[in-house]
Amino acid sequence: MTDDLIARATALDAADPLAVYREQFLAPDGFDVVAYLDGNSLGRPLKATAALMETFIRESWGGRLIRGWTDEWMEWPLRLGDRLGRVAIGAAGGQTVIADSTTVLIYKLARAAVAARPGRDRIVLDTDNFPTDRYVLEGIAAERGLELVWIETDPDTGIHPGQVAEVVDERTALVLFSHVAYRSGWLADVPEITRIAHDAGALAMWDLCHSVGSVPVELDRWDVDLAVGCTYKYLNGGPGAPAFAYAKKDLLPGLRQPIQGWMGHRASFEMGPGYEPAEGSRALISGTPPILAMVPLHANLDMLESAGIGAVREKSLLLTGYALDIADELLAPFDVEVVSPRDPRRRGGHLTLRKPGFEKLLDPLWDAGVIPDYRRPDGLRIGPAPLSTSFGEVYRGLSVLRSLLEK
């Protein structure tokens, strides 16, 4: 069986139309990683990113100095936002900005959303969503005197339309869920859940952190109201890279985001006495944008646009499907359980393997050059990034895991 798995990896890599992109990623001399299986937490850097950063520092920043703001930097949050919207999330121009961290943007959009639904006092969320989403909504509920309606979700799967339909009503202002569940990789039915929220008169907001750059997203077509996502996972933006915010165009005029900074003002450099929000998506910006941290996105969006999100998704499913087969053949005899969807229609870009005591294997795996991710309780996440991960790499990584289990 092992020989068959190796032969399959070799054949899949040979037939991979995206294999050429692996050469565009940076692998320094002495690189000790045998298998990087944590692309769903932090993407690898591109060679082009290193070059762009040097050019920016030497020429744009070093050469133009403060003139860079009027040259182009002031428009980067909108221009890059529009490009990300077009390439990665199915959003027409004028609806997406690159700005703060995911946490800050969730707060800004969710707080604006509940204010845009006066007379409604409930927010619907699920118990297994990423902690930031839950914590932010808890804070907003405390600020505004709102009630949180919790949907109990199975950590092995995720949110289902029927669960949402049971709890939304005329008191619901907002529902917030993740497109791909951070633990299991469950892929939610965004169009149907959004429709259910709208039928109740509520706004629908989605966390795209574990799907953008890996799973096709069609925010405009799905009629989504609001969305937030990060850029340091499958978009390879780097540690602490800025997040993005999306607000549906016809919703924007009625939104008043709560962090009123100078950069979101109608006329930033007038420095007037009162806050007047800018028109359109610029109103979602608060303070000075993180320009240096946006530089990598230029290279990463170039790559994603060239590859095409459809091809990325196709390889992602092949990678996770291959990992499932390895788990069934090599890991299941050691009582390793797959707790991610086997149905490709409901599977995002990563898998979770579960076995009590997995936490003790993290250091030995890292020492052996295999880098997965760990999520309590007992969950080892396998997140192959389609543009940087080969099938052989998946095999090597999971083979090391089997060897450690044998010991």
Image (cartoon, grey):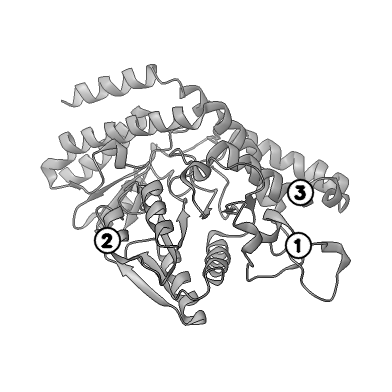
Q: Residue 199's quadrant in the figure?
A: bottom left
Residue 122 is situated, as x and y percent measured from the top left of the image, at: 41, 73
Q: Which mark is residue 75?
A: 3
Q: What is the spatial separation of the Cα atoms under label 1 and label 3, in whole angstroms?
A: 11 Å
The residue at 39%/29% (across/down) is 315
Dot 1 corresponds to which residue?
263
x, y percent for residue 126: 34, 64
Direction from residue 337 to residue 94 in the image, left or right: right
Amino acid type assigned to the residue bearing label 3 in the image? Glu
In this view of the protein, can residue 131 be seen by the observer? yes
Quadrant (top left/top right/bottom left/bottom right) for the N terminus: top left
Task: Name the element at disc 3.
Answer: helix
Q: Would you say residue 160 is visible in this rendering? A: no
Position of residue 98 measured from the top left corner of the image (x, y, whole percent): 64, 52
Name the residue beneath numbered marker 2. Answer: 153
Amino acid of disc 1? Met
